[in-house]
Image (cartoon, helix red, strand yellow):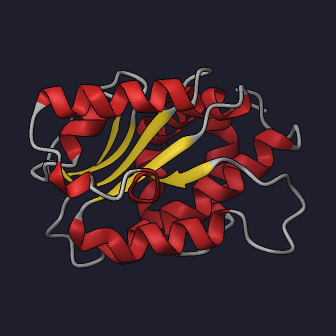
Amino acid sequence: MDLIKWSLDAIRSSSKELSWMEERRLEWAPLLASRLRYLIDGAPFIIICDEDREWFESYFLRSINRKGSHRPILPFISLKSLYPRLNDINSKEEISLLDDMLSISFPNGFVYFYIGKSSSKLCAIAKNRTSSYMWLFDEQAENSFYLSSTDENLDFKLLSMFRLFDRTIDAVLFGRVEL
C-alpha cells in the first residue's frame, strides 16, 4: 500500500484525534516518506526542539523506543545530549562546525528533526541542511510541515502527529507500506 492511502486509513481509524490531519495528508505523507527513507537506510534523526517544546522533545524520546515495542530500537537522539552547549551557537560558522562534528560521528548521514518556531535560533541549524525534517511553526519552508504557534490545539496536534509518525514507522518496518 502506498503511504498516502495508508495515512488516510490511519487517520480515519484514529477517531477524532487526527480528523484535522485528513485534509493535510497530501502535505504530510510525501515529506514523511522521503525522510523515513533516511531512517530505513540507517541515518539517525537528531531531535531539536525550541525552548517552548522541550517537553515534547522529552516525550518524543521517551516514547519513540518505548518498552514492549515489537520493533528494533531506532536512532533518535537529542542534539542537546550530543552537544550540551547548543544554545551557545550563534553563527553560520558555528553551525558548520556542529555539522562537521555530526558528519564525523555519523559518516552515513543524519537528519535534523526540528520541532518549533521558525524564529528560534535553533531552527537555523535545521534549515542549514537539505535533509532536515521540520514540524515548523509560523513559516512554510522546504522540508517542513506547517503549524501555527497560536493554534490553541497545538500541543494536542503535536501529540497526535507523534502517534501517526510512530504508527507510520511501524507500517514501513513491517512491510504494510512502501515508501
Q: In the image, residue 148 lies at what x, y percent?
A: 19, 59
Dividing the picture into quadrants, the one containing residue 43 is top right
| Front residue (pair 24, 75) | 75
Name which residue lies at 59% across and 21% down: 107
- The mark total stands at 0
| Image-based side of 4 in relation to 19, left or right | right
Q: In terms of image quadrants, where is residue 33?
A: top right
Q: Give the x, y percent position of residue 15.
A: 61, 74
User: Residue 24's spot in the image, x, y percent?
Assistant: 41, 46
Residue at left offset 61%, top offset 28%: 38
Considering the image in quadrants, where does the N terminus appear?
A: top right
At x 56%, y 66%, the residue is 61
Residue 49 visible somewhere in the drawing: yes
176 w.r.t. 137: above or below = above
Which is more toward the observer, 179 or 14?
179
State whether residue 15 is above or below residue 86.
below
Considering the image in quadrants, where does the C terminus appear? top right
